[in-house]
Image (cartoon, grey):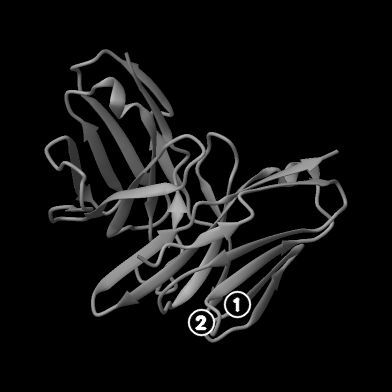
Amino acid sequence: GAVVSQHPSRVICKSGTSVKIECRSLDFQATTMFWYRQFPKKSLMLMATSNEGSKATYEQGVEKDKFLINHASLTLSTLTVTSAHPEDSSFYICSARVQGVSTGELFFGEGSRLTVL
Amino acid sequence: SQQGEEDPQALSIQEGENATMNCSYKTSINNLQWYRQNSGRGLVHLILIRSNEREKHSGRLRVTLDTSKKSSSLLITASRAADTASYFCATLYSGAGSYQLTFGKGTKLSVIP
């Protein structure tokens, strides 16, 4: 199956700093990638849809200036948590659709656990 | 919202038993997908059933879909300890340039050796 690589898997940062998480599709092109946030023992909450070459589409309630998304190529999307605070601590997961496949199944990265001190 | 709702929220069974998880949703869909998540890891796609299908098998997995009741079930037969994970259903609606895959809250399955 298609492989999505997410990096870093764990990151600890101080309050006020910014953290960048990368999501790469390794063996396929992904015009669309999705960023989710998952709280402990909860489901995935879609944060935004990342579109290659255009602005990301954010879900209601997600601050676009707080969570910067860039999808500069067909294989890479990045999520930058700016001026991170302890309440931003969470598990962030990216996923991607295979370009040209209509069934809609997603391939997920392994997730990034962010801890803001 | 057409978010899927799984039940039960948690399920604990003995190895070798069958595990059944249910999912209900609210609006029309193109397909329904089941994913698995090991603790602290990403999700892995298990199986997809289209809206015009009623049942699908893949190895020890059996999925049913009842669009009249807007519900689906995932059956894992002859469970193993390695099946311990959280299982999520996700409903896909796509059309007119939109794509919306919505995840349910998940069922946490524990298989006791």
Q: Amino acid at mark 2?
A: Ser
Residue positioned 37% across, 55% down in the render: A96
Q: From the viewer's perspective, is residue B17 above or below residue A112?
A: below
Q: Position of residue A33 (x, y in %)?
A: 31, 53
Q: Is residue A67 left or right of residue A4?
A: left
Q: Secondary structure at mark 2?
A: loop
The image quarter containing residue B26 is bottom left
The image quarter containing residue A87 is top left
Residue B83 seen from this side? yes
Are the residues tagged 2 and 1 within 8 Å (C-beta)? Answer: yes
Q: Position of residue B5 (x, y in %)?
A: 51, 60
Residue positioned 17% across, 39% down in the render: A68
Q: Position of residue B102 (x, y in %)?
A: 40, 61
Q: Indicate the chain on which mark 2 is placed.
A: B
Q: Amino acid at mark 1?
A: Leu
Q: Is residue A76 left or right of residue A83?
A: right
Q: Which one is in front, B90 or B68?
A: B68
Q: Indicate the chain on which mark 1 is placed.
A: B
Residue at which label 1 appears: B65
Q: Which mark is residue B51?
A: 2
Q: Which mark is residue B34?
A: none
The image quarter containing residue A92 is top left
- Quarter of the image for the N terminus of chain B: give it: bottom left
- Quarter of the image for the C terminus of chain B: give it: top right
Q: Position of residue B72 (x, y in %)?
A: 60, 71
Residue positioned 26% across, 71% down in the render: B98
